[in-house]
Image (spheres, rainbow, N blue to C red):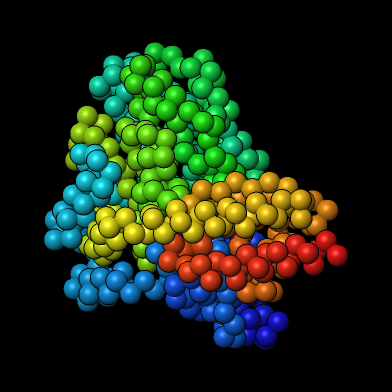
Amino acid sequence: MDSRQAQAIEQVEQYGAHNYHPLPVVITSGCGAWLTDIDGNRYLDFLSAYSAVNFGHSNPELVRVATEQLQRLAITSRAVYSDTFGPFVEALARLCGKDMVLPMNTGVEAVESALKVARKWGYEVKGVPQDQANIIVMEGNFHGRTISVISFSNDDAATESYGPFTPGFVPVPYGDLDAIAAAMDDNTVAILVEPVQGEAGVILPPEGFLAGVRELATSRRVLMIADEIQSGLGRTGTTFYCEQAGVVPDIYLLGKALGGGIVPVSAVVGDAEVLGTLRPGQHGSTFGGNPLGAAVGRAVVELLETGELQARSRELGVHLQERLAALIGRGVTAVRCVGLWAGVDIEPALGTGRAICERLLARGVIAKDTHGQTIRLAPPLVITREELDQALDALESVLAEAAA
């Protein structure tokens, strides 16, 4: 390893908290589907910052919008109106087919905000007795790492030594409609679900599951909250994965790609009956809805309104699925793919997912492991078929090398 890379890594390891275990590479720039390290080596990015970079690194239109806005105004706080806020929330509400937008910054802030709003709706609209609301959540979920959110995680790494935890959540197996129905009672105010469980390894819902959740929520006057922070905004071949199930949730949770890979932007998007329960002073964020984030967020919506990126994700996703499926039995035990998003389970005899990712790094591809034997692939939606094949060729070679 070059001395500059080693020095940069050592600096992080000495002064940065060790809450991540990065791959041993120091990135200095990015363009499209490519990243460049401190020594000038280039890598195909098959992580996309966990889908935050759906539209590619240094997307020219998004950079132009951000640069122009930075030269005018970056932040005011919501103590006053800004000229970019209104156009952003109107455009996003229309994209989602909803009435209102509550802007935040990070994805987990959107999740936390939705939990608060769901409880408020339960007490003030549904009539649940105060402090008795419960929210049904899925096992294997990943919604972030704040205290309330890890309170309903069953990942030991996320929960160990962090208790006591926030009450009011009822976990059920992902995909099990009978378990959801059995868990519901008169005090249930919401069902929170990732339409596709990303961190768990791109776990797709069983046929009819999301439609069943929608039906249960409607019949019991419960909010369906869809966390589309990773699955949304074109990643799966449609603007939202819920579209593929013919489902419209009561609340969309959005983030990551909503900031265009430039600034943190997240949002809770819902109807007036739900978000209209908020009153001044009851919830807020200094940076949420800031002029810079709003300008970039609106530009992201405009990119999605044409449908071109969604179509690209669908078309290239078919090719991704075909090539990955051909690796089953050749170092891969299972593949789950939707759009330009895949979970690939590695044969344990070849090594861990981390070991395969390290081998991929040496061949110029950046990917991320999860839960031991799985690697996730999520290239920017602007990737070309040739670039996609280049990375998949590298994966095929790595697997063959590991099996030798």
Q: Residue furthest right?
A: 404
Q: Is residue 22 above or below residue 36?
A: above
* Residue 358 coordinates in the image, percent (x, y): 70, 67
Residue at horizontal 28 percent and vertical 19 percent from the top: 126
How many numbered tags mark residues here?
0
Residue at horizontal 38 percent and vertical 54 percent from the top: 310
Foreground: 319 or 194? 319
Q: Is residue 379 visible?
A: yes
Q: Is residue 212 above or below residue 352?
A: above
Foreground: 225 or 245? 245
Q: Is residue 10 above or below residue 219?
A: below
Q: Quadrant of residue 12?
A: bottom right
- Left or right of 181 on screen, residue 399: right
* Residue 312 coordinates in the image, percent (x, y): 41, 59
- Left or right of 376 on screen, residue 130: left
* Residue 181 coordinates in the image, percent (x, y): 48, 17
Q: Quadrant of the N terminus?
A: bottom right
Residue at horizontal 42 percent and vertical 43 percent from the top: 241
* Residue 2 coordinates in the image, percent (x, y): 67, 85
Q: Quadrant of the C terminus?
A: bottom right
Q: Is residue 13 visible?
A: no
Residue at horizontal 48 percent and vertical 52 percent from the top: 339
